[in-house]
Amino acid sequence: MVVDKMTISWATSHPMQRLFVRSRLSAGMVIELDRGQANYIVNVLRMVPGDPILLFNGEDGEWQAVVADRGRRSTAGLAVEAQTRPQPPPFDLLYLFAPLKQARLDYLVEKAVEMGVGRLRPVLTQHTQVHRLNVERMQANATEAAEQTGVLVVPPVAEPVDIGDLIDGWVEKEGKRRILFCDEGGEEQDPIATLRGLPAGPLALLIGPEGGFSDNERRYLRSKPFVTPLSLGPRILRADTAAVAALALIQSVVGDWKSGGG
C-alpha cells in the first residue's frame, strides 16, 4: 500500500498514534507489549489507560485499541476494539538499491516504504561506497515509516547481495520477475511508454549508486532478457531522488496509483 486517497482520508480523520505489532489482531484481545514498546507507549508518548491507538501487523488490517489498565507492576497492554481498515493486497514490487551513506540511506528506506514497495534488498556494485550495512536499522526505519504514514505493510529488508550473484541467480530465485534497470546512460527516452509496453508480471526496480553503474555492469544487465532499461529523463539525479522518481512512475503506470489506486 502507498499513500493514496484512502490513506489521505485516514490521515485527516485519524490523527492518533499507530503501532506495528507482531501478534494477530482481532476484537476483544489484549496485546501484551514487549519492554521497548511499553516504554515507548508510557514514557515517550505519555499515554495512559483509555488512550486510543491504532495497531497493524501487516496481515489483519488496522485496528483501534486503547491502552489497558494493567496495574503499576505489569507490562503495558493494549485492548483491541474494532477494525478501522481491512488489509489491502500488497503491490509486489521488489526494490533493489545500492547502499548510500547513513542519513541518505535512512531517507531512501523511508521513502521506499511510503511509495509502496513490497521488499527491499541492498545490492553491492562496483561503485558502491558503503559495504558494511546495519540491516536491523534499515528494518527499524521501514517499520517506523509504516507507522507514521498509514501504510499497512512493513516490507522486509534482505541481506546485501553482490550484483553479479544477484543477476546470475535471478531466474532460479525470482522466476519471471522483470528487473527495471534505471540506466542514466541509456538511449530510452520515454519511461511511460517503456512501462506500458512491459509484459504482465511481477517487477523489481534496480537503482545504482552515486556515480552510477560501471560500463561492465551496464552491458551485463542489458544482455539479460529479464532486464528492461528505464530512463528517468535528461537530468542526472541523485540516487535517492532517482528512487522516488522511478517509484512514482511505476506506481502511476503499472502499480496501485493507476485508476485512482486500489
Image (tube, helix red, strand yellow):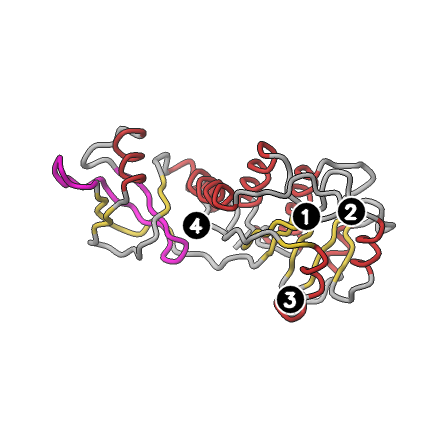
Which disc is residue 152 wearing?
4
* Dot 1 amino acid type: Leu
The residue singled out by tag 1 in the image is: 249
The magenta-colored residue range is 52-75
Instruction: Please give the count of numbered marks on the rendered protein.
Output: 4
As helix, strand or loop, the secondary structure at mark 4 comes to loop
Query: How many angstroms separate mark 1 from mark 4 (CA)?
Result: 21 Å
Query: How many angstroms separate mark 3 from mark 2 (CA)?
Result: 26 Å
Earlier-in-chain disc, 1 versus 4: 4
For label 3, count other residues whose C-alpha is less than 10 Å away and answer few (under 14), some (14-19) or many (20+): few
Residue 7 horizontal side relative to residue 220, left or right: left
The residue singled out by tag 2 in the image is: 213
Earlier-in-chain disc, 1 versus 3: 3
Q: Which residue lies furthest to the front in this view?
A: 132
Which disc is residue 201 wearing?
3
Residue 57 horizontal side relative to residue 69, left or right: right
* Dot 4 amino acid type: Leu
Q: Position of residue 182 (x, y in %)?
A: 75, 49
Asked if 89 appears above or below 191 in the picture, the reply is below
Residue 121 horizontal side relative to residue 165, left or right: left
Q: Do the residues labelled 3 and 2 touch (CB within 8 Å)?
A: no
Q: In the image, which is nearer the foreground, mark 2 or mark 1?
A: 2
